[in-house]
Amino acid sequence: MKKRYAIIAALLSVLCSCGSKEVTNADALTKPAVASVVSQVVGIGKIEPENSIIQLSAPVNGIVVSILKSENDTVSAGTPIIELDSRLEEAKVTQLTAELNTQLNQLKADEAGLGEYEAKCSNAVSELQCLQRLLGKGAETQQVVDDANTNLKTLQSNLKRLQAGIAASRSRVAQSQAALNTALIERDQKTIKSPVAGKILELTTLAGSSVDTKQSVVQISPLGRTIAICEIDELFADKVAVGQKAWIRNVGSTDTLSAGVVYTAFSFLKKKSLFTDQAGEKEDRRVRTVKIMLDQPDKLLLNARVECVIDISGNLKK
């Protein structure tokens, strides 16, 4: 009898246990899931001048004879930085300058002679008209009038020839001036100058070295504000907007180096380009390029790799 009661008690215990599990599972199904809200997105970026670092190359091939500036020097637009060997160009400028001066002096002499002939022609015309009046009164002979007419025609012919010579001289002067201007440009190309006001970051050549037009010899940071340019993964790209606050920190760190505001967000996605693990890396993910204007960039080095944290909470509330 006791054994029978024990079996019944065990069965009741099992039934109660199953009922408890069913209630627990039902509660789990009906209980709403708590979704995690993302308020910040992080992208990898780098620090740059607002107008980008300028890679300056030589306009022509040549040999470096003098380096006029050093790294970290501040330069203005047009400041000479590197001089290439320009002895041949200097000689050409000197030669063409001498030729041009000779032609200018000859042109001045021809123009003075032209004025003299113009005065003679004017006098010859007046003299012929006077003789023709006297001939009409019988006070002069036809031979004298004919001689005056022949003299006038000779002067006029010489005047035309002189005018044509002056026109040719002026053409030669213009050609020589153009040749000299070209020589001056060629000579000036032997001096590498800064195209903007800024700071020299790096010089990659030495005196005596050969440089060509495909070789970057100077890096210049233009004067102006400093920005962080970063790439946001396409998963959160549409959450980023102009005007959002941002913070800059070292990769893997939580310390803020500078704060800023998003001022440009590109309207298209592209492949990652700022940083990749290796050349030719295949990457299916796309990114959106974002530019952040920094408030206090003094602690940041140009080209430094950083993390850009962007606050998107305001965008999510909308």
Image (cartoon, rainbow, N blue to C red):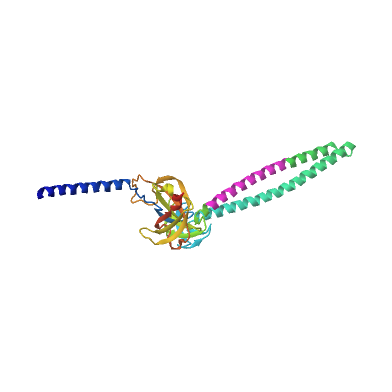
The number of callouts visible is 0
Name the dominant secondary structure of the magenta segment.
Answer: helix
Identity of the residue drawn at 41% across and 45% down: 270
**Location of residue 40 by image quarter:** bottom left
Relative depth, front residue between 46 and 176: 46
Q: Is residue 109 visible?
A: yes
| 198 sits left or right of 162 in the view | left
Part of the protein shown in magenta: 157-185
| Looking at the image, residue 4 lies above or below residue 87 | above
**Position in image of residue 38 (x %, y %):** 39, 52
Relative depth, front residue between 212 and 250: 250
| Looking at the image, residue 138 lies above or below residue 62 | above
| 64 sits left or right of 162 in the view | left
**Location of residue 159 by image quarter:** top right
Q: Is residue 57 visible?
A: no
User: In the rendered structure, does residue 144 fall within the stretch colored magenta?
Assistant: no
**Position in image of residue 15 (x %, y %):** 20, 46
**Position in image of residue 204 (x %, y %):** 42, 58
User: In the rendered structure, does residue 165 fall within the stretch colored magenta?
Assistant: yes
**Position in image of residue 163 (x %, y %):** 69, 43
